[in-house]
Image (tube, rainbow, N blue to C red):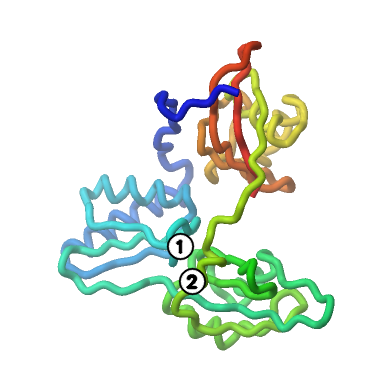
C-alpha cells in the first residue's frame, strides 16, 4: 500500500456560512470580539461543534481579533468553547467537569452516551451548554460530563436518573487520564476509484456507490456537519461523515495509487 506523509495533499478549504443560523453565529462572535477587546474583559461562547469552531475562527479573523483560544475541558475535546481573552484581562475557566456515577444492580448495563445526553437535556439545558461526555473504561458505570461552569451546580443537584438507571453527579476537579484518552479505533483500509463522496462513502459503509448516492440524495449524509448535496462532491483527508442511522466515520488518511489506479484510503467508525 502506498502512503506518504511528505507529499502535499489537497485540503478542504473554509466553507462560508450555509444558513441563517451559521450567519448569526458569525455575527455574534464578531460582536463578542469587539466587546471583549473594547472593554478589556473576556467573553465566552457556548460549546461549539467542529463546524461551528471553523465559523467562529473565521469570524474572529474577520474582526481582526487574535486573543482567542478554544477549550473543551481537556486536550482533544470535540466540542469546545471559544474563549476571547484580551491581554492582561482577568480570565476564568468556562468549562466544568462532573463525574456521573451509575448505581448499577447486578448484571445491569451502564447508561450510554445517548442516555446521559438525553437526561441532561431533559433538565431544560440547551445543547450549547454541554461539551463532551466521556466514559471511563477503567471504571464501568462512571462517565465525565464537560459543561459550562455556570450550569454545573444545577446539573449536579438535579441529575438523578439516566435512562432507567439512578445516577449521582458531583464536581470533579480533574478527570482521570483514562477517561480523556483517545480511544483506540479499528482503522480499516479500502481502495476507491476517486475521492468522490459516493465512492468513499460506499467503501466506508461497504455498500455500492449507487446506494451511497441514494443516502446522499435523501439528505442523510453530512460532512463536517454540512449536508452533502451531491455524490459528485470531492471529499478530503480528515473529513468526518455523519450518516443518519449508520453512525459517524472519519476519512483518516488518503494514500497513493494502486497498480489499477485506485486510491488507497484509511478510515474508522466512531
The quarter of the picture where the N terminus appears is top right
* Res. 251 image quadrant: top right
| Residue positioned 56% across, 72% down in the render | 144
What residue is rendered at 44% in x and 72% in y? 148
Q: Local crowd at mark 2 within 10 Å, few (<14), some, or many (≥20)?
A: many
Which disc, if any, is residue 47? Answer: 1
Q: Residue at x 61, y 52 (%)?
A: 184
Mark before the other along the chain sequence, 1 or 2: 1
Where does the image place residue 52, in percent across and percent down from the top left?
A: 44, 51
Identify whether 38 is placed above or below 107.
Answer: above
Closer to the camera, 135 or 230?
135
The mark total stands at 2
- Measured Cα–Cα span from mark 1 to mark 2: 8 Å
Q: Does dot 1 land on a helix, a strand or a loop? A: strand
Kindly indicate whether the residue at mark 2 contacts the one at mark 1 (C-beta within 8 angstroms): yes
In-image side of 194 versus 24 (left or right)? right
Amino acid at each position: 500500500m502506498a502512503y506518504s506523509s511528505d507529499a502535499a495533499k489537497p485540503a478542504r478549504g473554509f466553507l462560508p456560512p450555509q444558513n441563517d443560523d451559521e450567519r448569526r453565529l458569525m455575527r455574534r462572535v464578531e460582536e463578542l470580539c469587539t466587546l471583549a477587546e473594547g472593554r478589556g474583559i473576556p467573553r465566552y461562547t457556548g460549546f461549539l461543534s467542529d463546524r461551528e469552531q471553523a465559523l467562529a475562527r473565521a469570524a474572529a479573523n474577520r474582526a481582526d481579533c487574535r486573543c482567542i483560544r478554544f477549550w473543551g475541558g481537556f486536550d482533544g475535546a470535540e466540542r469546545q468553547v471559544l474563549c476571547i481573552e484580551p491581554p492582561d484581562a482577568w480570565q476564568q475557566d468556562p468549562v466544568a467537569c462532573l463525574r456521573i456515577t451509575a448505581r448499577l444492580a447486578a448484571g445491569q448495563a451502564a447508561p450510554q452516551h445517548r442516555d446521559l445526553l438525553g437526561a441532561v437535556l431533559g433538565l431544560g439545558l440547551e445543547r450549547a451548554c454541554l461539551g463532551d461526555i466521556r466514559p471511563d473504561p477503567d471504571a464501568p458505570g462512571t462517565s465525565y460530563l464537560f459543561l459550562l461552569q455556570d450550569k454545573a451546580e444545577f446539573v449536579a443537584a438535579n441529575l438523578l436518573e439516566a435512562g432507567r438507571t439512578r445516577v449521582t453527579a458531583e464536581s470533579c476537579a480533574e478527570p482521570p487520564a483514562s477517561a480523556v484518552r483517545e480511544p483506540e479505533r479499528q482503522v480499516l483500509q479500502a481502495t476507491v476509484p476517486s475521492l468522490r463522496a459516493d465512492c468513499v462513502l460506499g467503501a466506508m459503509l461497504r455498500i455500492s456507490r449507487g446506494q451511497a448516492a441514494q443516502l446522499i440524495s435523501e439528505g442523510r449524509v453530512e460532512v463536517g456537519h454540512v449536508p452533502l448535496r451531491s455524490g459528485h462532491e470531492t471529499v478530503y483527508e480528515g473529513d468526518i461523515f455523519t450518516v443518519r442511522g449508520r453512525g459517524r466515520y472519519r476519512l483518516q488518511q488518503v494514500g497513493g495509487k494502486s497498480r489499477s489506479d485506485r486510491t488507497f484510503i484509511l478510515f474508522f467508525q466512531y
